[in-house]
Image: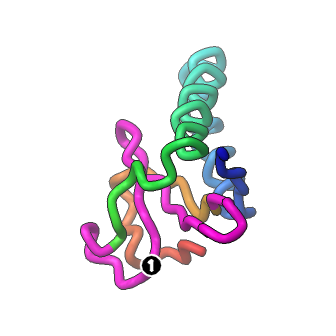
Amino acid sequence: MPYKILYLEHAYTDLETILDHIAEDSPSHAIEYLKFLKNSISKLSNFPYLGVTCKRKHIRRECRVLIIENYLVFYKTNESSKIIIIGRVLHRSVNYKTKKLF
């Protein structure tokens, strides 16, 4: 049974920021890239452990990180309710250790 994907408010804001940034150069590319990101994230529905553990990124939290090109998608998996919670979508250049992830 596939997992349901739930985006937290910070994740939506992150995606909007990414869209706005890319749209400065190319609005059409921004929309296509957003589709690409969301499609890549949707793969977690069937493969919830696709990302690496946060500990591998030196984060002391129980979460996982899906790497999509230059972006890091921080998420948690809830086994009992079959839900993937997307906390943040951050560019790799951002100091994610100082950010609120969930």
Position in image of residue 98 (x %, y %):
43, 78
Q: In this view, does 72 lie to the left or right of 43?
A: left
Q: Is residue 49 above or below residue 55?
A: above
Residue 63 within the magenta-colored segment of the rendering: yes
Position in image of residue 34 (x %, y %):
61, 31
Q: For mark 1, what is the residue?
A: 62
- Classify mark 1: helix, strand or loop: loop
Quadrant in which residue 86 is drawn: bottom right
Position in image of residue 76 (x %, y %):
55, 67
Give the residues in magenta. Answer: 55-84
Q: In this view, does 86 lie to the left or right of 57?
A: right
Q: Residue at x 41, y 68 (%)?
A: 96
Can see residue 86?
Answer: yes
Q: Is residue 21 above or below residue 5?
A: above
Position in image of residue 54 (x %, y %):
36, 70
Quadrant in which residue 26 is drawn: top right
Q: Residue at x 66, y 23 (%)?
A: 31
Q: Residue at x 60, y 67 (%)?
A: 79
Quadrant in which residue 32 is drawn: top right
How crowded is the residue under tag 1: few (<14 C-alpha within 10 Å), some, or many (20+)? Answer: few
- Locate the C terminus by quadrant: bottom right
Residue 74 within the magenta-colored segment of the rendering: yes
Three-letter residue code for mark 1? Glu
Residue found farthest to the front: 1
Q: Is residue 46 above or below residue 32?
A: below
Q: Is residue 31 above or below residue 69?
A: above
Foreground of the two, 89 or 64: 64
Residue found farthest to the bottom: 60
Q: Which residue is drawn at 34% across and 78% down?
A: 59
